[in-house]
Amino acid sequence: MSTRLATGADLPTLASVLGEAFADYPWTRWTLPGDGRLARLTEIQGVYLAHAAAHGGRVWTTPELDAVAVLIPTSLPDPSPEVGERIVALHGDGWQRLVEHEVAIGPRRPEADWLLATVGVDPAQQGRGLGTTVLEAALADLGDARVLLETSSEANVRLYERLGFRVVEQVESAGPDVWIMLR
């Protein structure tokens, strides 16, 4: 399977892939409660993808655009105030949960060069190794750089360990548990 860096024209499709991939993810259900979750999630993913791509992030995908891995430098600037307001509005009642998470988790994060922001696969294509493929390409591109990630899926912990990550801390929270991992 081949991979490539995404282009700007790819981002709307990849936002849809991420929306579908994370529609039922425990973290997403907790931080995006209420009606219209898929549409809001897809828009949020589009905003994040555009921001990452505009500020030195690396968005890896397959030629078919059915898998995506997004890595962002830890020095990524905050979105503009207008974009930030849109993100808050899209999260609705879940925004306060994100703020509380950041207050609790932020100080526990180890120093790193990059953050694995997300990796997702079109649900119709899951189980074929596409997520691992784009993630391996993305990590290879970064060489020996330190990469941080957070996951709220225990099954994902094993996948990330196979790719060289180690658990730094498992954090219990008001929502799903979170594993902080570093490579």
Image (spheres, helix red, strand yellow):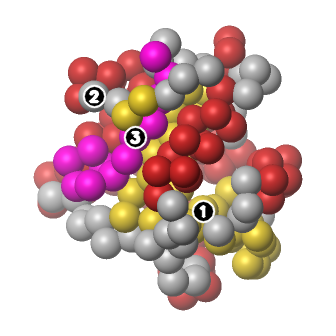
Residue 48: image location, x then y, percent: 34, 45
User: Decide: marks 3, 2 in contact (CB < 8 A)?
Assistant: no
Which label's residue is closer to the chain start, 3 or 2?
2
Residue 52: image location, x then y, percent: 31, 49
> Disc 3 versus disc 1: distance between alpha carbons?
15 Å
Residue corresponding to mark 3: 59
Above or below 160: residue 145? below
Q: Is residue 58 magenta?
A: yes
Above or below 163: residue 26? above
Q: Left or right? Give the position of 168 relative to 50.
A: right
* Res. 149 mark: 1
Residue 111: image location, x then y, percent: 51, 83
What residue is at 65 percent from the left and 68 percent from the top? 183
**Mark 1 against mark 2, which lies toward the viewer?**
2
Q: Is residue 94 visible?
A: no
Residue range in magenta is: 52-63
User: In this orientation, which residue lies closer to the viewer: 121 or 178?
Assistant: 121
> Disc 3 versus disc 2: distance between alpha carbons?
8 Å
Element at label 3: strand
User: In this orientation, which residue lies closer to the viewer: 138 or 31?
Assistant: 138
The amino acid at mark 3 is Val
Which label's residue is closer to the chain start, 1 or 2?
2
The amino acid at mark 1 is Leu
* Res. 7 mark: 2
Q: Is residue 65 visible?
A: yes
User: In this orientation, which residue lies closer to the viewer: 102 or 180?
Assistant: 180
User: In this orientation, which residue lies closer to the viewer: 167 or 35?
Assistant: 167
Based on the displayed image, in which of its 4 quarters is residue 80 positioned? bottom left
Based on the displayed image, in which of its 4 quarters is residue 9 positioned? top left
Which label's residue is closer to the chain start, 3 or 1?
3
The amino acid at mark 2 is Thr
